[in-house]
Image (cartoon, rainbow, N blue to C red):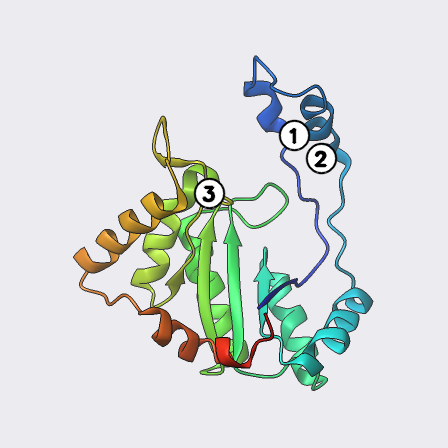
Amino acid sequence: MCSLNMGSMNFAFHNMGAKVTSWRFPWEKAYIAASESFIFRNTFADIARNYSLLEPHGTKFEHECYDIGHLYNLAHFADRGIAKPPFFIQSVFGILGGIGADPENIAFMRQTADRLFGDDYVWSVLGAGKHQMAVVTQAALLGGNVRIGLEDSLFIERGRKAASNAEQVVKIVRIVRELGLNVATPSEARSMLTLKGKHSVRL
């Protein structure tokens, strides 16, 4: 699989620097502050080039959509016959510069994807930082899949850092099951994502 971001945006996290009183490495403060001027470039030409380079190898794309317009960008490539269904869409909420983590936005993202792609997509959701568990729980209730991990949030609960990715996975599995929903096995997940399987990958 390969992440494919579906549009350019201001991907900023400079405001996090104001909360830090002690820096571990000398480069950190300047790096975080510089994100205020950072443009996360993913032009139509960039996206098309990624398709042309990777699609012939059977790569499965994780279409990362940080805003509603990114869904329409994916629809544009589908209309051109470049992006081929079934699409794997990863909706991202709570990044400064992208769509907010409000419940209404999560529902709107789902409704828009349904309208544009019908049954030809698998929907997954991640929530950044403090929004992680609430966002993915709502997504599960809307029939979506969830992404959890330290890349998206360092915490397992308010004020307590997660010991590992596994601790976060265990928590969301418990939540999903308590909601009466099912958790896919690794084999079922590969089938849902139409992956070619380990046997067809040269390691």
Image location of residue 48, percent across then percent down = 77, 73
- Return the disc, 1 or 3, that comes first in the chain's sequence: 1
Q: In terms of secondary structure, where does tag 3 sit?
A: loop
From the viewer's perspective, tell me whether residue 109 is left or right of residue 155: right
Disc 1 packing (10 Å; few <14; some 14–19; many ≥20): some
What residue is shown at x 65% (from left), y 30% (from top)? 14
What residue is shown at x 74% (from left), y 68% (from top)? 47
Q: Nearer the viewer, mark 1 or mark 3?
A: 3
| Residue linked to disc 1 | 14
Q: Amino acid at mark 2?
A: Ser
Image location of residue 13, percent across then percent down = 62, 34
Q: Which labelled disc corresponds to residue 35?
A: 2
Q: Determine if residue 170 is in view.
A: yes
Q: What whole-number distance in Å separates the C-alpha atoms at marks 3 and 2?
A: 20 Å
The N terminus, quarter of image: bottom right
| Residue linked to disc 3 | 150
Q: In terms of secondary structure, where does tag 2 sit?
A: helix
- Return the disc, 3 or 2, that comes first in the chain's sequence: 2
> Vertical placement of 196 versus 111: above or below?
below
Q: Amino acid at mark 1?
A: His
Image location of residue 12, percent across then percent down = 66, 38
Q: Determine if residue 197 is in view.
A: no
The C terminus, quarter of image: bottom right
Disc 2 packing (10 Å; few <14; some 14–19; many ≥20): some
Do labels 1 and 2 touch, CB within 8 Å? yes
Q: Say which of 153 and 44 sits in front.
A: 153
Image location of residue 167, percent across then percent down = 32, 43
Q: Choose top left, top right, bottom left or bottom right for residue 6.
A: bottom right
Disc 3 packing (10 Å; few <14; some 14–19; many ≥20): some
